[in-house]
Image (tube, rainbow, N blue to C red):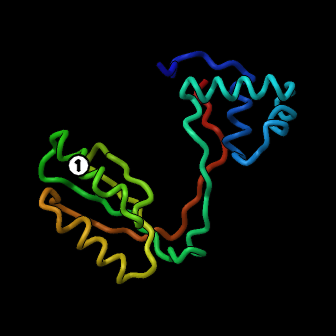
Amino acid sequence: MKNLQRTLDKTDLQILAAMYEDPSLSNKDIAAKVKLAPSSSLERIKRLQSDGIIEGLSMRVNLNSLGGHIQAMISVRLKDHNRATVDNFQMSLLPLPEVMNIFHMGGENDFFVHVTVGDSIHLRDFVFNAITARPEVNHVETALVYEHQVSHTLPNFQ
């Protein structure tokens, strides 16, 4: 059982902040930043992972270099809001190569689907074929993403 409620001490938070800022840091670099022996740092990182606090590491890729010249946020409203419809909608879109993120929302829209495509024709076809054509979809709006920035500062809730 993952302990998502355990109290994190100052050193745990420093380790998380260092890794959040730069996931490519070696354990030795993290240990030096937080003033721990590398063995102690590694033990803490493994505990953070086993407790489910660190859920994984990720990599950012320049999407333009892969041909993803257009990003968009597609807002979607469903006709029906039962659990099966919501889950099926998400699970059917998530494996599609255009889909980067799916946000299940409260409020006017049920989902924001973050996509990347090569050009406007690909975007149009994706919206029509993967989203609008679905019988459970009631409304769709597409907004182009001009720029996307990600913070590398760990949120502080204390």
Image quadrant where one finds the C terminus: top right
- Residue at the spot x=70%, y=45% of the render? 21
Residue 50: name its quadrant. top right
- Residue at the spot x=50%, y=74% of the render? 68
On screen, residue 46 versus residue 103, left or right, reads: right
Which residue type does callout 1 highlight?
A: Asn
- Residue at the spot x=74%, y=30% of the render? 14
Residue 138: name its quadrant. bottom left
Residue labelled with disc 1? 88
On screen, residue 124 versus residue 77, left or right, reads: right
Classify 26 as above or below 108.
Answer: above
Q: Residues within 10 Å of mark 1 (few under 14, many from 20)?
A: few
Classify 136 as above or below 40.
Answer: below
In this orientation, which residue lies closer to the viewer: 153 or 36?
Answer: 36
Q: Position of residue 104 (x, y in %)?
A: 32, 46
Q: Position of residue 90 (x, y in %)?
A: 29, 50
Classify 81 as above or below 98.
Answer: above
Classify 105 as above or below 70.
Answer: above
Q: Position of residue 149 (x, y in %)?
A: 59, 58
